[in-house]
Image (spheres, rainbow, N blue to C red):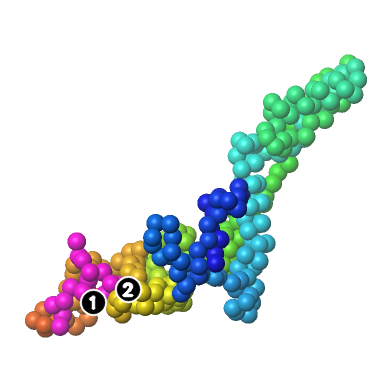
Amino acid sequence: HVLLHHDWTAFKAAEARTLPLYPAFEEQSDGTLRAVIHYKDYEPTFEHYGVPPYIAGFNVSAIAYKTDKWNISRLDNSFQLSGVMMLDSTVDSEAEAERIVRLAEQKFAGNPGQVMFVIRDGGEQNDNSRFIPIASQNEGDWQALHEQAVSDIVVAHSWFRTLSGLEYASGFSAERILHEYEVALNTVILGEQAELTEPIRQLLTSVSGFDTSSLQIVNRPPTRSKPIYMKVWEARKADGLEYDPDDERQQAFLSEITKYNIRSIE
């Protein structure tokens, strides 16, 4: 049996329900027979040799987090230069000096503070208060590090860059998107879908007697290189290939021969 509960954080045994695992069925209070198909997904290390994606991408994820946090702190500080502020002043005590420094940090240093304030006893001399900037030349390095970390995260998790919404330097390309989608279909999507639908096929066949040979999941690409209302000969003409408008085989619409099961051109 499988234990079911609507809120596991507030689990109460009296509110929980149980259902048997398929192929066993159990009659419910409403007179229906019910069962549960239990899917289990194991860690990648149990199925393949190698490092799990969440471990492989842990360090680069930390880099992306820290560089992003660094950019936020610069924004909070209005992109002001870091430096040391020397203040000439006469104070009565260390506590008074500390109070002046804290007030100055709150007003001028941003959050988090990037300016260090130093108070020195100026006495009767002229006021020599000044700001000493600390020049930083590593902005480009931080940006490159962040971009590299994002790219490494995609690689570590075996994601597809354009399908993840990340563009290449040359921008988005419909052909590249379709190519990655084709690879994703053959390496990830179709295999997972087959595992999910096989128990459903068996259940519908054994319980209801349905013919499930045509049962399939419709996959549609996120974009198309050509409109699906084009005919085959028009598409061949657009690609610079030989075409024959009078050939009966080339009269079909692309929607009729696509492998993505698009059944309507509307």
Q: Tell me where residue 225 appears, x and y as whole percent.
A: 29, 68
Magenta residues (range) = 249-266
Residue in the image at 72% along x and 35% along y: 113
Position of 266 with respect to 166 (left or right) is left
Tag on residue 208?
Answer: 2
Query: Mark 2 is on which residue type?
Result: Ser
In which quarter of the view is residue 130 placed?
top right
Query: Mark 1 is on which residue type?
Result: Ile
Q: Tell me where residue 127 appears, x and y as whole percent.
A: 81, 21
Image height of 57 relative to 24, above or below? above
Position of 216 with respect to 13 (left or right) is left
Q: Tell me where residue 239 appears, x and y as whole percent.
A: 24, 75
Question: Where is the N terminus found, in terms of image quarters?
Answer: bottom right
Q: Is residue 124 magenta?
A: no
- Viewer can see residue 125: no
**Residue placed under numbered mark 1 in the picture:** 257
